[in-house]
C-alpha cells in the first residue's frame, strides 16, 4: 500500500531541510503586517503543527514495541518533515519581521538559530536527543512569538511587555511539557532535565539579548528612512528633496552635498500596531577624527501612533551640519535600535536635486 513511499527514509534529512526551506518561501508570500489576523493565525498554526508532531512522534516512540531491527512505518517519516516545515516557517516569519525592525547586529541571533536547525538534522541522531533539540526550538519559537504578540494586545512596548512575554512563554511551554509527560512518561523522564536546562538557557540568552539592546523592539519596525536636503509635509504626503543615487550606492556610504548654512533632514516612517503609542528618537552623531569615536550632537524625540500601513511618518532637522562622517540612529525611547542612516557630508551645493514623494 505504501510502496510509493519507499524512497522517503533514504532522503529523510534532505526532506527535513527542504521542508524548512519551504516554510521560508511560504512566509515570504504570506507575511505583510505582524498585527494582522492572518499573520497571527499563521504563527499559531506553525506552533501548533510543531507541537503536535513532536508530541505524536514522542508518543509513537514511547509506546513502540518494535525490535531495533524493525523499521518504523513509512508514514511516520513525515512527522520530522512536518516539524521542520513548521519550525522553518516560524524562523522565516521572525527573520522577516526582525530584519525589518533593526540593523543586522540586532538580527544575528536568529541566523545562529537557523544554522543550529540545519546542524541539528545531522548531529542529533538518537530520538531522545532530537526530542531535546526540537522541544528547545519550540520554546524558542513560543518565546519569540510572545515577544512579538504580547505588545499588540497590551498596546505598549518596553520592559513590562517583555517580562510579560517571558511569563506567557513559560506558561505555554509548561503545558506542552505536561502533555509530553502524559503521552510518554518513561521517555520524557529520560529527557526532562536536558529539555528544562536547554530551555532555561534559551530564556536567559534572549533576556541578555533584549536588555543589552541587541534584539529590536518588535512589533515596532522601521518601514522607511532617509537623509534629505529638504522635507515638506504637503497634505497627506511627505515630499523629500535629495540627489538622485545609483542602485549600487545602497551598498556604500553615500555623500550628501549641503550648501553652507543649509540644514539636513532625517526622515522615518515607523510601523506600530493599532492602538500602540510610543516615542521615537533620532540621534544625530558626528565622527570625531581626533578622538576616533562617534560624538552625539543632538537627540530629538517625538511621539508616534500605530495603525498606518506605511508607518507613522516624521522627521528631524540638523542645521548647518559640518563636513565629515555622520550617522543618525533611529531608536525607541528605551534605546532599542530600529535602524541607522550613515552618510558623509560635503559642504557644496547639491548636484541636480530632485523631489520625491516619500509616502
Image (cartoon, rainbow, N blue to C red):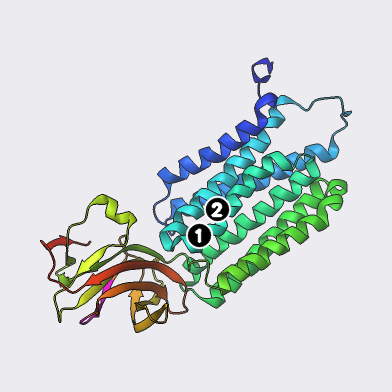
Q: Give SS at disc 1.
A: helix
284 sits to left or right of 335: left
Q: Nearer the viewer, residue 356 or 252?
A: 252
Say whether residue 268 is visible: no
132, above or below 22, in the image = below
* The quadrant where residue 72 appears: top right
Q: Quadrant of the N terminus?
A: top right
Q: Residue at x 67, y 68 (%)?
A: 204
Q: Nearer the viewer, residue 91 or 181?
A: 91
Residue tagged 2: 111
168 sits to left or right of 239: right
Q: Residue at x 22, y 52 (%)?
A: 246
Q: Percent position (x, y) of residue 269? A: 31, 66
Q: Percent position (x, y) of residue 127? A: 78, 41
264 sits to left or right of 11: left
Q: Percent position (x, y) of residue 110? A: 55, 55
Residue tagged 1: 107
* The quadrant where residue 230 appears: bottom left
Q: Percent position (x, y) of residue 220? A: 42, 67
Say whether residue 110 is visible: yes
Span shown in magenta: 314-320
Magenta residues, dominant SS class: strand
Q: Quadrant of the C terminus?
A: bottom left
Q: Residue at x 71, y 31 (%)?
A: 76
Decide whether residue 58 is among the magenta residues.
no
126 sits to left or right of 94: right
Q: Are marks 1 and 2 in contact (CB under 8 Å)?
A: yes
Q: Nearer the viewer, residue 65 or 89?
A: 89
Calculate the distance from the C-alpha at mark 1 to the C-alpha at mark 2: 7 Å
45, above or below 143, in the image = above
Q: Give SS at disc 2.
A: helix
Amino acid at each position: 500500500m505504501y510502496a510509493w513511499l519507499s524512497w522517503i527514509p533514504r532522503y529523510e534529512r534532505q526532506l527535513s531541510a527542504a521542508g524548512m526551506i519551504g516554510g521560508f518561501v511560504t512566509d515570504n508570500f504570506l507575511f505583510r503586517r505582524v498585527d494582522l489576523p492572518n499573520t497571527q493565525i499563521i504563527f499559531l498554526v506553525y506552533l501548533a503543527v510543531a507541537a503536535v508532531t513532536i508530541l505524536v512522534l514522542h508518543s509513537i516512540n514511547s509506546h513502540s514495541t518494535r525490535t531495533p531491527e524493525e523499521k518504523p512505518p513509512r508514514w511516520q517519516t513525515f512527522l520530522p518533515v512536518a516539524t521542520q516545515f513548521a519550525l522553518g516557517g516560524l524562523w522565516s516569519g521572525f527573520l522577516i519581521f526582525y530584519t525589518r525592525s533593526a540593523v543586522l547586529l540586532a538580527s544575528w541571533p536568529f541566523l545562529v538559530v537557523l544554522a543550529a536547525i540545519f546542524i541539528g538534522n545531522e548531529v542529533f541522531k538518537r530520538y531522545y536527543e532530537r526530542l531535546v533539540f526540537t522541544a528547545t526550538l519550540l520554546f524558542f519559537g513560543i518565546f519569540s512569538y510572545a515577544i512579538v504578540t504580547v505588545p499588540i494586545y497590551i498596546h505598549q512596548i518596553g520592559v513590562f511587555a517583555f517580562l510579560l512575554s517571558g511569563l506567557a512563554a513559560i506558561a505555554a511551554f509548561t503545558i506542552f511539557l505536561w502533555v509530553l509527560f502524559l503521552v510518554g512518561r518513561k521517555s520524557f523522564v529520560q529527557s526532562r532535565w536536558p529539555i528544562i536546562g536547554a530551555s532555561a538557557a534559551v530564556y536567559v540568552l534572549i533576556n541578555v539579548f533584549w536588555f543589552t539592546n541587541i534584539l529590536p523592539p518588535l512589533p515596532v519596525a522601521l518601514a522607511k528612512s532617509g537623509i534629505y536636503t529638504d522635507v515638506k509635509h504637503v497634505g497627506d504626503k511627505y515630499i523629500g528633496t535629495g540627489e538622485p543615487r545609483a542602485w549600487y550606492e545602497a551598498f556604500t556610504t553615500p555623500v550628501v552635498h549641503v550648501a553652507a548654512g543649509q540644514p539636513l533632514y532625517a526622515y522615518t516612517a515607523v510601523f506600530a500596531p493599532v492602538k500602540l503609542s510610543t516615542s521615537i528618537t533620532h540621534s544625530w552623531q558626528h565622527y570625531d577624527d581626533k578622538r576616533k569615536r562617534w560624538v552625539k550632537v543632538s537627540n530629538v524625540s517625538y511621539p508616534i501612533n500605530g495603525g498606518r500601513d506605511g508607518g507613522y511618518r516624521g522627521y528631524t532637522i540638523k542645521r548647518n551640519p559640518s563636513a565629515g562622517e555622520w550617522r543618525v540612529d533611529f531608536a525607541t525611547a528605551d534605546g532599542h535600535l530600529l535602524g541607522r542612516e550613515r552618510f558623509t557630508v560635503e559642504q557644496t551645493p547639491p548636484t541636480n536635486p530632485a523631489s520625491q514623494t516619500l509616502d
